[in-house]
């Protein structure tokens, strides 16, 4: 694989532990913010409130070798690629959320499913 992965900022959420963190994005969930590093602020030009965006982020401190897991909500074991589990070979997460506002390099969104301070990888129109 060529190149390297570069973070563009952090995701601010109310969740400090995995136990608090929801297993899915909730459009009616608590307020969250995508906080971009200053070098990437210009990349937000053309995005607008009300728009749905695809957010890519990196789950830290996870088990990257567990290929079969039991879902958090229970049920039978499944392969990691059939789950939204953060424990995966490449812990890249993807969620679609709606932009509520954009100000000073920060996007207000709702209901992200990650811990406070999660590294932000990319944002794309959904």
Image (spheres, grey):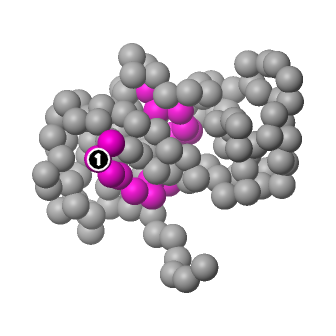
Q: Residue at x 27, y 68 (%)?
A: 39
The quarter of the image holding the N terminus is bottom right
For the C terminus, the image quarter is: top left
Asked if residue 71 can be seen in this view, the reply is: yes
The outermost residue toward the bottom is: 2
Q: Quadrant of residue 19?
A: top right
Residue 63's place in the image compared with 23, above or below, is below
Under circle 1, the secondary element is strand
Position in image of residue 7 (x %, y %): 45, 63
Q: Residue at x 53, y 33 (%)?
A: 113
Looking at the picture, how far across and down is residue 95, in whole percent? 46, 39
Magenta residues span 111-126
Which residue appears at 44% of the width and 26% of the height? 111
Seen in the picture, residue 39 relative to 62 is either above or below; the reply is below
Q: Residues within 10 Å of mark 1 (few under 14, many from 20)?
A: few
Q: Is residue 36 left or right of residue 2?
A: left
Question: Compared to 34, does 50 lie above or below?
Answer: above
Picture coordinates of residue 41 (x, y %)? 22, 59
Labels in figure, total: 1
Q: Nearer the viewer, residue 19 or 50?
A: 50
Residue 11, compared with residue 74, is above or below; it is below
Q: Nearer the viewer, residue 46 or 119?
A: 46
- Residue in front for this viewpoint, 30 or 48: 48
Which residue, given by chain and number where applicable, does mark 1 sit on? 125
Q: Residue 118: within the magenta?
A: yes
Res 30 visible = no
């Amino acid at each position: 694989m060529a190149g390297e992965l570069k973070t563009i900022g952090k995701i601010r959420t109310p969740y400090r532990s995995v136990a608090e963190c929801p297993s899915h994005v909730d459009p009616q969930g608590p307020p969250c913010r995508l906080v971009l590093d200053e070098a990437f602020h210009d990349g937000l030009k053309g995005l607008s409130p009300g728009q749905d965006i695809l957010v890519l982020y990196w789950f830290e401190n996870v088990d990257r070798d567990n290929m079969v897991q039991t879902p958090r909500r229970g049920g039978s074991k499944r392969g990691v690629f059939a789950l939204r589990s953060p424990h995966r070979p490449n812990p890249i997460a993807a969620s679609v959320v709606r932009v509520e506002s954009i100000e000073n390099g920060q996007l207000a969104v709702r209901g992200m499913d990650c811990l406070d301070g999660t590294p932000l990888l990319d944002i794309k129109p959904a």
